[in-house]
Amino acid sequence: MPEEYEVAVVGGGPGGLTTALYTTRLGHETALINREGGRYTTVEHVHNVIGISEETTGREVTELALSQLEEYGADHHADTVESVTRADDGGRFRVEAHDLTAFADRVVLATGFKDAPPGFPELTRYTGHGLHYCLHCDAYSLIDEPVYVFGHTESAAEMAMMMLNFTADVELLLHGAEPEWGEETGEQLRAHPVGIREEEAVAVHPRDSEAERPEIGTIEFDDGTVREYVGGFAKYGTSYNNRLAKGLDCELNDEGAVQVDDHGRTSVEGVYAVGDLTHGQNQTPIAMGDGARAGLALHHELRTFPVPLEEIEAGETPSEFDVPAVPEAIREKAHGVQKRDDHAGMTPSDPEEK
């Protein structure tokens, strides 16, 4: 039999996890459906989240969050969603995954985006160890170090100039491609102390070849030059995982991101979208904020009380209110949480252990 939910969240990154956390704790039957090994689980160092050490991985954050959702009463399905369509009743949504069919009153899309890799496959093995995609996450770790930016577009030129805020040693690697930036950007770039290297990269050498996960050391070019870098960025664009949104006829912007209002509502009634699918900011706390706002908006749409006065005056409500409105299954979970001395998620260290 199909599962029945008030909210189905598709995608298990920070945005989707936070949305599901809010809707569950606000008393709505919620399902989180995400494929195993999603993009966020590959993050080796989570940055810019208050109280979270850089030693923490995206996989660890995900596992802690899933344990919280289970404790509070959400259902987690490790599955890949194939389609989301309007159900035959015209109101609910039918969510079809490999091993799951579910109906939901509201759907939240949190399917994220992909960074396009550099046109030099050998460099990709250093992802997270010298190859980065998010300046706001990783520029801090490259302060005063030799840095590269791989790319030949407007965004690559802009990132190279932005990195001068953090280091005086920045090179823009064209990898044999013709620059695609405009005349004004070219003039601006020439005025900045950014080195531009036109040669193709032919090899990458690790700093320590014996390391389990070697970090980038040098890049060799086809003219014989070998240049040392501590790290850098690739700027070859992004692609949004918007297949499900397109299937629902959600409005997209020119780049393919899903258009939403300040509360995560898309152009399709009942469909929300959060996180990188809507903006590609690639920032954990921003995605969490998206999820929190969407969770609150969903609660305001779905909550039973207060009953609007016009419904009361029209006699559309029962003579005796059925309270509380929170489903019994979530209430039972809440009773257990109220009695627990320990809870899922990260817990403070015992001062006596220090």
Image (cartoon, grey):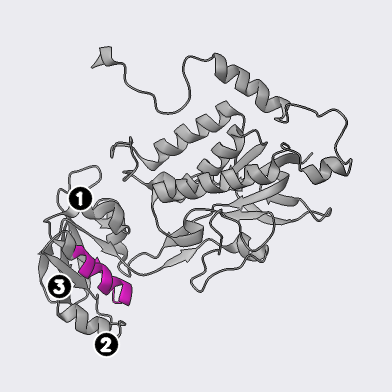
Residue 157 image-quadrant placement: bottom left
SS at mark 1 in the image: helix
Q: Which residue is mark 1?
A: 141
Q: Residue 204: percent from the left, percent from the top?
A: 20, 61
Q: Amino acid at mark 2?
A: Glu
Taking the image as shown, residue 117 lies to the left or right of residue 163, namely right
Residue under the image location 70 percent in, 30 percent down = 326
**Residue indicated by mark 3:** 194
Q: Secondary structure at mark 2?
A: helix
Count neighbours of disc 2 (C-alpha within 10 A) and say few if under 14, some if 14 to 19, many if 20 or more: few
| 150 inside magenta stretch | yes
Q: What number of labels is visible?
A: 3
Q: Are marks 3 and 2 in contact (CB under 8 Å)?
A: no
Instruction: Give the answer, above or below, for where 341 lies relative to 276.
Output: above
- The magenta segment: 149-163
Q: Position of residue 197 (x, y in %)?
A: 17, 76
Report the Cα–Cα distance between label 3 and label 2.
16 Å
From the image, which quarter does the C terminus lie in? Answer: top left
Q: Is residue 94 left or right of residue 184?
A: right
Mark 3 secondary-structure assignment: loop
Q: Relative to 84, does residue 171 appear above or below in the rendering? A: below
Neighbours of disc 1 within 10 Å: few (<14), some (14-19), many (20+):
few
Q: Which residue is mark 2?
A: 183
* Between discs 1 and 2, the one toward the N terminus: 1
